[in-house]
Amino acid sequence: MPLRLAGRVSTVAPFLAMEVLERAIVLEAEGAHVVHLEIGEPDLAPPPEAVEACARALAAGETRYTDSRGLLTLREAIAQDAACRTGARVDPGQVLVTSGTSAAMLLVFSLLVSPGDEVIVPTPHYPCYPNFVRVCGGVPVFVPARAEQSWRVDPAAVRAALTPRTRAIVLGSPANPTGAVQDRGTIEALADLGVPLVSDEIYGGLVYDGETSASALSLGRDDVFVLDGVSKRYAMTGFRLGWVVAPAEAARPLQVLQQNLFISANRFVQHAAVAALREGANTTETMRAAYASRRERLVAGLRQLGFGVTALPAGAFYVFADARAFDADSRRLAFDLLERAHVAVTPGIDFGEAGEGFLRFCYAASESDLALALERMRGALRAA
Ligand SMILES: Cc1ncc(COP(=O)(O)O)c(C=O)c1O
């Protein structure tokens, strides 16, 4: 008997970055050497203190469930780190520890969105934002930003998209895929629009050229949700550890959702996160310095090849380059580069209609891989 799948499944589009990766794995199994610039994953190692803390915790038998909200020591470390970085006062009672920022996103949208409700998604956007909304029965409403305006989110355009059904605005800053960093005034204007702001700050601190990334926490409001985690800042993607700092009144309902959906985040990984937050600053700084110089080389190389990059991205670790000189169909171009040049990149359409015609290049890859990718693309694009 054929399986009858729930309607929500068909509302969720494939994550194209993963589709590119999965095709690349097939090519590699056939003997090809692929340069990977498609996945947003640091190539550098996590803080050794975090790895050691994790191993120590495992050896000491820290293998059971924790309080569904997370270990108190970790929630205190998160509150302290947030206070240090943003100047905000955060109560550990507002912190819920999750298995990755992704899980925090699911909990927050489950909390806010009923079927038919709308969530404003400035675009180009992280591919999964609208899909989390759809899984909750909601409707993403896209508000496009433009490369010529450094991908700045326009609060007036967001205001114009509000309806009585709007339940939240989701903002990523520093942003995937554009690297844009929204200034404090913009974040404040968005928070002032009368619906909760869900601020994804997973790339917080990964900024260049003296830029700072403002946190929605610094607004001191009681209607913002800040999502964060150890994946990017500490190169700990596989640890699967994130959190949400929520308004006090949301803490208990989030806790109840977590108890039911996930029970708790992984216990020994929570110890690793405490160590990363307390002792991982050097690792983050080393990564940041490496990304800053890779970013400049990659942008220069892409411009030389004929890609359009209006300005150096201010944060995160991506270049979102205009590829329309080669092909306006970003999906076709990305898969073509993979097949012919063995360079894996993400098609801009993965990040919404506003990203069509662009390709996303991740520069959390070694200098030699970046150079090789540019060389291979030079050959493939010339031959096309
Ligand atoms: C903007 C953004 N938010 C969230 C995530 C997911 O983070 P995590 O690994 O903590 O689930 C990613 C991963 O690429 C991301 O780019």
Image (cartoon, rainbow, N blue to C red):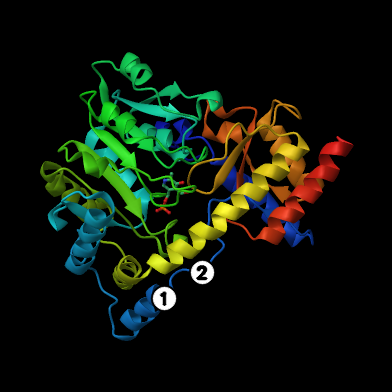
Tell me what residue is drawn at x 44 percent, y 62 percent.
Answer: 284
On the image, numbered disc 2 is attached to which residue? Answer: 45
Q: Quadrant of residue 334?
A: top right
Determine whether, in the image, residue 114 is placed left or right of residue 170: left
Who is closer to the viewer here, 183 or 69?
A: 183
Position in image of residue 78 (x %, y %):
25, 59
Q: Is mark 2 within 8 Å of ligand 1?
A: no
Which kind of residue does numbered mark 1 sit on? Val
Query: Residue placed farthest to the front in the image?
Result: 210
Which kind of residue does numbered mark 2 sit on? Ala
Q: Quadrant of the C terminus?
A: top right
Q: Residues within 10 Å of mark 2 (few under 14, many from 20)?
A: few
Tell me what residue is drawn at x 55 percent, y 53 percent.
Answer: 292
Q: Is mark 1 within 8 Å of ligand 1?
A: no
Tell me what residue is drawn at x 21 percent, y 60 percent.
Answer: 80
Sequence order check: which comes first, mark 1 or mark 2? 2
Position in image of residue 79 (x %, y %):
21, 57
Who is closer to the viewer here, 363 or 2?
A: 363
Position in image of residue 346 (x %, y %):
62, 42
Give SS at disc 2.
loop
Residues at circles 1 and 2 in contact by the CB criterion of under 8 Å: yes
Query: Residue placed farthest to the bottom in the image?
Result: 59
Q: Is residue 158 above or below residue 172?
A: above
CA separation in Å, label 1 and label 2: 10 Å
Give SS at disc 1.
helix
Q: Which mark is residue 15?
A: none
Residue 6 visible in the snapshot? no
Q: Residues within 10 Å of mark 1 (few under 14, many from 20)?
A: many
Q: Quadrant of residue 67?
A: bottom left
On the image, numbered disc 1 is attached to which residue? Answer: 51
